[in-house]
């Protein structure tokens, strides 16, 4: 079966149809994690944080990633300061800079993560990103 791009009205149905795995901070939906022709790994997941929850303490890793805030308000720790981001915000993170994310709102916050491993950048064992 070939890939059929969803319409805008399909996107909510597709996301809700993915199995949500509970976490201490909320839940995660794994979309894909696979090597590509040019990357050791391309990974996408959708995280929902409970009000006031954080994904994890600030950390570093070899991969780069893009976060897209879907709903809610988050605070991003990056370059030794906290920055606020709301729905529609697009955040690029280099893995070498300490970074972390927390829900700054009173309702759940959901964001999409696209992370990639360039050839030779990942030590054995891997890293899951944010």
Image (cartoon, rainbow, N blue to C red):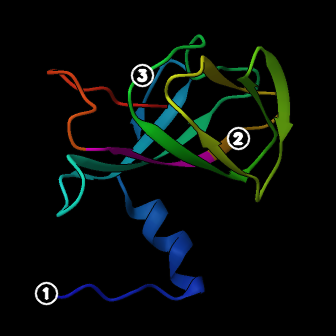
Q: Residue at x 24, y 53 (%)?
A: 39
Say if mark 3 contacts mark 1, CB within 8 Å. no
Residue 39: assigned label = none
**Magenta range:** 111-118
Q: Is the stretch drawn in magenta largely helix, strand or loop?
A: strand
Q: Is residue 97 above or below residue 87?
A: above
Q: Is label 2 in a helix, a strand or a loop? A: strand
Q: Taking the image as drawn, is residue 105 in sight?
A: no
Residue 109: assigned label = 2
- Circle 3 is placed at which residue position? 61
Q: Nearer the viewer, mark 3 or mark 1?
A: 3
What is the spatial separation of the Cα atoms under label 2 and label 1, in whole angstroms?
Answer: 33 Å
Say if mark 2 contacts mark 1, CB within 8 Å. no
What is the spatial separation of the Cα atoms under label 3 and label 1, in whole angstroms?
Answer: 35 Å
Q: Magenta includes 124?
A: no
Q: Magenta includes 115?
A: yes
Residue 1: assigned label = 1
* Residue 42 rendering spot, x and y as whole percentages: 30, 51
Q: Crowding at label 1, few (<14), some or many (≥20) Cα neighbours within 10 Å?
A: few
Looking at marks 2 and 1 on the same chain, the residue that comes earlier in the sequence is marked by 1
Q: Crowding at label 3, few (<14), some or many (≥20) Cα neighbours within 10 Å?
A: some
Q: Taking the image as drawn, is residue 110 in sight?
A: yes
Residue sitting at the far front: 120
Q: Is label 3 in a helix, a strand or a loop? A: loop
């Amino acid at each position: 079966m070939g890939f059929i791009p969803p319409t805008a009205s399909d996107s909510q149905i597709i996301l809700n149809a993915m199995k949500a795995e509970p976490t201490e901070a909320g839940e995660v939906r794994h979309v894909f994690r696979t090597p590509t022709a040019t990357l050791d790994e391309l990974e996408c997941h959708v995280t929902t944080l409970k009000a006031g929850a954080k994904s994890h303490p600030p950390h570093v890793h070899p991969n780069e990633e893009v976060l897209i805030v879907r709903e809610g308000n988050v605070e991003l720790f990056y370059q030794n300061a906290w920055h606020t981001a709301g729905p529609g915000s697009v955040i690029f993170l280099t893995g070498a800079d300490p970074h972390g994310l927390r829900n700054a709102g009173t309702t759940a916050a959901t964001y999409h993560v696209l992370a990639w491993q360039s050839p030779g950048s990942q030590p054995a064992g891997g890293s899951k990103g944010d």
